[in-house]
Image (tube, rainbow, N blue to C red):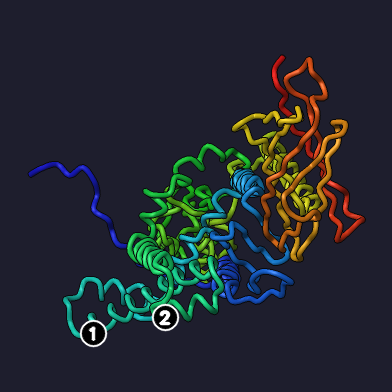
Amino acid sequence: MAEQLFQKRIPIFPRGVKGRFRSIKYVILFVAYGIYFLMPWMRWDRDFGPHQAILFDIVGRKFYLFDLVVYAQDIFWLAGLLGIGAFLLFFVTGIAGRVFCGYFCFQTLWTDVFILIERLAQGERNARIKLSKAPWTANKIWRMSLTWFLWLLVAFLTGLSFTLYWGDAITLSKAFFTGQAPFPAYATTLFLTATTFVMAGLAREQTCTYMCPYARFQGVMFDQNTLVVAYDEQRGERSNGRQKPAKGLLKQEERLGKDVGDCIDCGFCVQVCPMGIDIRNGMQYQCTSCALCIDACDTIMDSINYPRGLIRYASENSMEGKKTRWLNVKTVGYGIFILLISGLLVWSIAHRSIVELTIRPIRKPMYVVLSDGRILNRYEIKINNKASELKRFRLTISGIKDAKLELGQENPVKVLAESSSIVLAKVVTHNPEKDKTRTYITFKLQDVTNSTTPALTKTSVFSLPSR
């Protein structure tokens, strides 16, 4: 018989549990789903542009985020957000372990809902295990069909909601269901429907264990002060290990007298774990710090009148009776980077200009010598109006004596709201510096619709004939 090089997946059927951490997860789940599914439908009044709160306009190369409009040239803001996200993840992980995975990760949130659907359609853990092992009867076909139908429904709503962020939700949804939407809308929805169904319904913990790189490298961010879900082995095992309740081992005092641990080996902590691990075996990279095992253990401890905390959030130092030090070089460094990048990002957004001016000399040819001896240079001038209203701009030049600006169109130049205009300009002058092959000219752009707006200036090269 050939040697098996991998272990076949062992299905996991998490048991339901109540507790404070489960309640926190439900609140986060409700808020996250509310934001994700409802935000495309949220209206937002604008003087110009779509009336949708969040919309990513790929064709127009603009992202609408409430009152903020992000243009393609503002892409460095995205780099700032990614930097903040990365350092925030490192900062939180260094302090509280993988709480992002356990409470906020999309995989965790959607898997939670898929498990709830599975529990609704098939019953609690024992019923699901029994159904999984049962032959394909009418009852099993009905329950599995109901489970998959509800999974597909949630997966489809997930994919469609994502698609609606890239177009007006009301218009795009009508076009989608009448067969008039563009092909990318159907392709994106189908792709996300399939991946959500597979990841949250079929793969589940396999995604976290084998596909997500964070599970592999997060350990390097832990230290002795990092909070993790920990089993108090000293209290749970003592000298004679864990034992189930029996005569003479019911009360905690009796177990203390016989040096038996407080863990009654009920297995509840293992049954509720969505990753299928036993936290009593120590910290494992599969653990996502969801804390459901803490709720399970606390429930059992309450039922037998033992103190809580046999499984709890704790650092390695605190488990050894030492003081947990939150402030260290690593966490302070991450915190400084987060504040620095956040400050720069906020400053950049607050001081962004609603008008941009770009000057590009046309190099073919670099210059033209007119019949009267004057020198002509041509320029491509791009004016980008980020305001939500039409603006008029007057262009003037300086820096070269007697130079004249010819636009070939009216000046002031009209630029529509949230649009750009390209102006082909000519600058003509006598050779101002015969001993040079180039000099410099300054273009000035003044907003005539609002005289209080500071003028923009750009300096460019004016090419001259060689000696």
Of 196 and 79, nearer the camera is 79
Determine which of the numbered discs, if any, sits on residue 309 in the image.
none
Question: Which residue lies at the image location 33% right of the left edge and 78% below the top edge?
Answer: 149
Q: Which residue is mark 1?
A: 139
| Disc 1 to disc 2: CB gap under 8 Å | no
Residue 326 sits in which quadrant? Answer: top right
Residue 254 visible to the viewer: no
Q: Nearer the viewer, mark 1 or mark 2?
A: 2
Q: Earlier in the sequence, mark 1 or mark 2?
A: 1
Give coordinates of residue 414: x percent, y percent: 75, 59
Q: Amino acid at mark 1?
A: Asn
Give coordinates of residue 61: x percent, y percent: 59, 56
Q: Is residue 78 above or below residue 467?
A: below
Of 141 and 34, nearer the camera is 34
Of 378 and 146, nearer the camera is 378
Residue 135 sits in which quadrant? Answer: bottom left
Q: Residue furthest front?
A: 371
Q: Residue furthest left?
A: 1
Count of numbered marks: 2
In the picture, measured across the screen, residue 346 lies left or right of residue 128, that is: right
Secondary-structure class at tag 2: helix
Determine which of the numbered discs, if any, sits on residue 177 in the image.
2
Give coordinates of residue 228: x percent, y percent: 56, 49
Alpha-carbon span between mark 1 and mark 2: 33 Å
Secondary-structure class at tag 1: helix
Give coordinates of residue 71: x percent, y percent: 65, 54
